[in-house]
Image: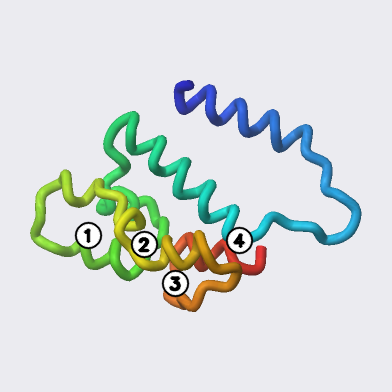
Amino acid sequence: MTPMQDDTFFAEIAARDHAPEGDQRAPSRLKARIYSSLVKRQQASGPLLSLVLTKASRRGLCVFEDLVQILPVGEKAKTFNCCSVCHARILGEHLEHPPIFWGNCPYVAFRGR
């Protein structure tokens, strides 16, 4: 699937989705695993958006991405998925309330949603 087809596919799923009675939500562990899989799939199709461009588009970077973004390294290193080697990913995929608290970490963001 192309990115446009992916967007259409997920938009159709979201449109069909009806919230169940009560406040039932997907566990944060499941959200983290899905996020990791989607990023890995996106990375397989080509390089991710550079951290420099991500920050320029006013999207927040986690503490590790921010560090890589300011390091004097090549552009290839700045398109690397830092989450793939981060302990926050492992904690987020295995614990419902991972003990991580820094801002702009997607695995922290999945808690409590």
Q: Position of residue 99 (x, y in %)?
A: 49, 78
- Residue at 34% x, 29% y: name it: 45
Mark on residue 69? 1
Mark 2 is on which residue type? Leu
Mark 4 is on which residue type? Ser
Neighbours of disc 1 within 10 Å: few (<14), some (14-19), many (20+): many
- Residue at 37% x, 51% y: name it: 57
Mark in the foreground, 4 or 1: 4
Q: Position of residue 58 (x, y in %)?
A: 40, 56
Q: Judge left or right: residue 75 versus residue 11.
A: left
Cβ–Cβ below 8 Å for labels 1 and 2? yes
Q: Coloring scheme of the render?
A: rainbow
90 in relation to 47, above or below: below
Disc nearer the start of the sequence (4/3): 4
Q: Which residue is mark 4?
A: 28
Q: Which residue is mark 3?
A: 103
Indicate the quadrant where residue 40 lies. top left
91 in relation to 57, above or below: below
**Most distant residue in the front direction:** 94
Rounded to the nearest angstrom, the CA distance separating label 1 from label 3 is 16 Å
Rounded to the nearest angstrom, the CA distance separating label 3 from label 2 is 8 Å
